[in-house]
Image (tube, rainbow, N blue to C red):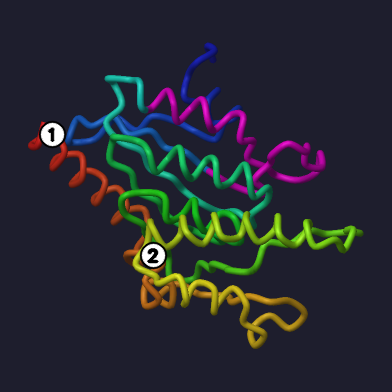
Amino acid sequence: MEKGTDHDDIIEFGSMILKDNKYNHSIFLLDIIGEIEGHEISSSDCKSTKYEHVLPLIAKIEDSDKIDGLLVILQTSGGDCSAGLAMAEMIASLSKPTVSLIIGDSHSISVPLATSTDYSFIVESATMILHPVRMNGMVIGAPQTFDYFKIIQNRIVEFIVTHSNMKKERVEELMLSKTLLTKDLGTILVGKETVTEGLINEVGGIDKALQKLHELIEDADKKS
C-alpha cells in the first residue's frame, strides 16, 4: 500500500480517518493504548503511545479544514505524567468537537485524557484508577522531592476537576483511599461508577460515541 494511507497511519500512529458515513463528516480516530511514553523510551516488548507522535497529530486536526471532529479511544494503564497531561491539554484546547471512549482501562495519567474531550463514554466492563503521583525505585527522601510530586498531582487534580463534574475534594479522597487497592493508595472505578462519580458522562460503546460526535459536529456547524 502507498505511504500515507489509512493502513500506514494505523500501523505507525494508531490513527485513521473515518469518512464513509451518512453525515459526510470526516472524523479523526486516535487510539491511545498501552503505556503513555514520555521522555524515557518504553521497553521494546511493551505496547506504547508516544507523545511525540500524538502532539503533531492533534495540531494537524486543529489546522485541517478537512477534519470535523476527534474520537479518542483509550485502553491504557497510564505512564509518563508530564507527557499524558500535555496530550490532555492539547486535546482540551481543540476548537473542533471531541469525544472519548474507554474500552478497557484508563488508569493513572490517562484519567485526564479521558476527561479532556467535550463528552466522554465508558463501556460497562472498563475501569479507571485514580491514585497519587508516585515514582518507582529509589528516591532521595528530600522535602523538595515531595513538594515537586505535590505540584504535579495538583495540576492533574485541577485538570480533572475542570474537565469533569467531580469536586476537588472527592477526587483527592478517591486518590488517597486505603481500602480498594491492597498494597497501594487509590480507587478503582468500574463502568457505571465513573458516571455516578461525575468523572465520565455516559456508559456506552462505539455506536453511542460516534453518534454523539456526529451530533456535536452538526451543532457546531449550525453555530458557525
Q: Residue at x 18, y 47 (%)?
A: 215
Asked whether 56 or 168 is in front, the reply is 168
Q: Which residue occupies the extreme bottom position in the image?
A: 179
Mark 1 Cα shell of 10 Å, populated few (<14), some (14-19), many (≥20): few
Q: Which residue occupies the extreme left position in the image?
A: 222
176 left or right, relative to 60: right
Query: Residue 200: which disc?
Result: 2
Q: Residue at x 70, y 55 (%)?
A: 148
- The amino acid on which the numbered mark 2 sits, given as a three-letter code, is Ile
Residues in magenta, as a range:
32-61
Q: Residue 62: which quarter of the image?
A: top left
Mark 2 Cα shell of 10 Å, populated few (<14), some (14-19), many (≥20): many
Q: Is 195 above or below relative to 221?
A: below
Residue 86 part of the magenta-drawn span? no
Q: Is 219 above or below relative to 151?
A: above
Q: Residue 166: which quarter of the image?
A: bottom left
Q: Measured from the top left, where is residue 8 in percent x and y?
A: 55, 23
Q: Measured from the top left, where is residue 64 in percent x and y?
A: 33, 20
Asked whether 130 or 17 is in front, the reply is 130
Q: Residue 147: which quarter of the image?
A: bottom right
Q: Measured from the top left, where is residue 214 in percent x and y?
A: 22, 43
Q: Quadrant of the N terminus?
A: top right
Query: Residue 221: which disc?
Result: 1
Q: Is 122 above or below relative to 184?
A: above
